[in-house]
């Protein structure tokens, strides 16, 4: 996304890549299907990813019955802070009636889609399109090898997946009962913003699909709670935007709603007012001199201006302005609103800004 600065690995500290839940499910499916036809599990099991890579996975679980077989692989997310790291992705395969084709099912710990707007239809297991395609390719390959019709039921389960899902976006997106099986490349790139951006897109898609015309992007829990209390919108209207305001606005350019509210703390909104569309501390900083100059334009005395220039943080400047009764937060909100509205270009979408202090109080609003 051209609106977001690329994330980089720390100098001298290369980060280990990992594997998506989709890649693990695919490998487990291949091993289980091999066992169903031969009685022997492929371990390690090698699959081909969409980019041509061919990783091998060791099995953590295997079981077989008369009409089914299942294999499990522990997900290794590498150095990415992924809540599904260490989860066991289990695939059970079973032959079905002639003409049934390949079908997917949600076992324990895998969610079911209950709201429109996602790439998987309502009522379907939360197994995304690319992992489905990867599994179908493996099934087709193995069935051809053994001369067996493509009538296979694939059930993916994740022990403890229901608890893991609480830490994800799934409850908000209307995916109930567990995690999603995700991935487009099969590879987890450490500290990549792509998964977060994908979740932002999914949140907007769900909101639009159920007819909401107002969404809220919050930089964190405190600002979201304040926006919820202030606006009283449906749960699906709230997007966990984090630092990726540019990613959200860019998606809204092509998929607009009538109104978007951006809620965040003083420092984050100050960065937006400066023109930053990625608000992470590693990729944008608050210009304290600029805040001091803004204070000068709204009547601050020389002592206050000097204190602002020498402040340690943006929030310190905000407290100085509040103590002096100067509306710096409101000025920041107005400028940030203009920045965000400009980022939307000609999209038919209006922007509001809420500035929230650390106690969860709204200290400025620009509409």
Image (cartoon, rainbow, N blue to C red):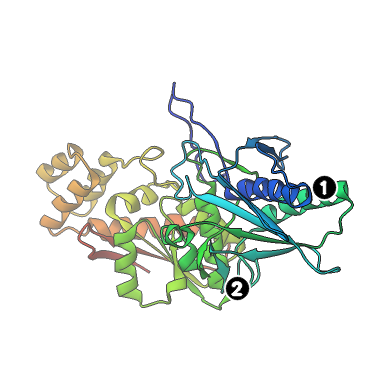
* Residue sitting at x 72%, y 52%: 135
Q: Is residue 52 above or below residue 364?
A: above
Q: Quadrant of residue 120?
A: bottom right
Vertical comparison of 177 with 148: above or below: below
In the image: residue 107, left or right of residue 341: right
- Find residue 183 and report its horizontal and vertical position in percent: 61, 49
Q: CA distance from mark 1 to mark 2?
A: 32 Å
* CA neighbours of label 1 inside 10 A, class few (<14), some (14 to 19), many (20+): some
Of circles 1 and 2, which is in front? 1
Residue at left 50%, top 36%?
Answer: 78
Whether residue 344 is visible here, answered yes or no, is no
The numbered mark at residue 141 is: 1
Of labels 1 and 2, earlier in sequence is 2
Q: Nearer the viewer, residue 21 or 198?
A: 21
Q: Position of residue 28 (x, y in %)?
A: 65, 48
Residue 8 percent location from the top left of the image: 48, 32
On the rendered image, what quadrant is the C terminus found in?
bottom left
- Tell me what residue is drawn at x 16 percent, y 52 percent: 319
> Eyeballing the image, is 366 above or below 88?
below
For label 2, the residue is: 116
**What element does badge 2 sit on?**
loop
């Amino acid at each position: 996304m051209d609106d977001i600065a690329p994330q980089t690995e720390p100098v001298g500290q290369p980060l280990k890549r990992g594997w998506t839940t989709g890649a693990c499910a695919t490998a487990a499916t291949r091993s289980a299907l091999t066992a169903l036809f031969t009685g022997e599990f492929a371990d390690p099991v090698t699959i081909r990813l969409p980019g041509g890579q061919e990783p091998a996975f060791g099995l953590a679980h295997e079981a077989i019955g008369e009409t089914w077989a299942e294999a499990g692989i522990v997900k290794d997310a590498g150095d990415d802070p992924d809540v599904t790291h260490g989860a066991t992705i289990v695939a059970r395969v079973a032959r079905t009636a002639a003409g049934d084709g390949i079908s997917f099912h949600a076992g324990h710990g895998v969610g079911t889609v209950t709201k429109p707007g996602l790439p998987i239809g309502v009522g379907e297991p939360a197994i995304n399109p690319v992992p489905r395609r990867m599994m179908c390719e493996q099934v087709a390959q193995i069935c051809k090898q053994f001369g067996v019709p493509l009538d296979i039921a694939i059930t993916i389960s994740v022990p403890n997946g229901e608890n893991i899902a609480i830490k994800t976006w799934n409850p908000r997106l209307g995916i109930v009962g567990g995690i999603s099986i995700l991935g487009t490349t099969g590879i987890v790139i450490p500290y990549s913003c792509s998964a977060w951006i994908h979740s932002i897109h999914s949140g907007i898609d769900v909101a639009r699909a159920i007819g909401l015309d107002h969404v809220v992007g919050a930089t964190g829990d405190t600002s979201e709670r304040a926006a919820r209390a202030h606006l009283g919108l449906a749960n699906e209207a709230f997007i966990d935007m984090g630092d990726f305001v540019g990613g959200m606005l860019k998606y809204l350019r092509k998929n607009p709603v009538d109104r978007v509210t951006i809620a965040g703390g003083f420092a984050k909104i100050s960065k937006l007012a400066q023109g930053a569309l990625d608000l992470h501390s590693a990729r944008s900083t608050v210009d304290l001199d600029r805040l001091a100059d803004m204070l000068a334009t709204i009547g601050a005395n020389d002592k206050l201006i000097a204190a602002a220039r020498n402040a340690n943080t943006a929030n310190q400047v905000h407290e100085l302005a509040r103590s002096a009764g100067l509306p710096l937060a409101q000025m920041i909100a107005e400028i940030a609103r203009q920045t965000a509205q400009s980022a939307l270009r000609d999209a038919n979408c209006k922007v509001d800004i809420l500035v929230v202090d650390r106690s969860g109080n709204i200290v400025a609003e620009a509409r």
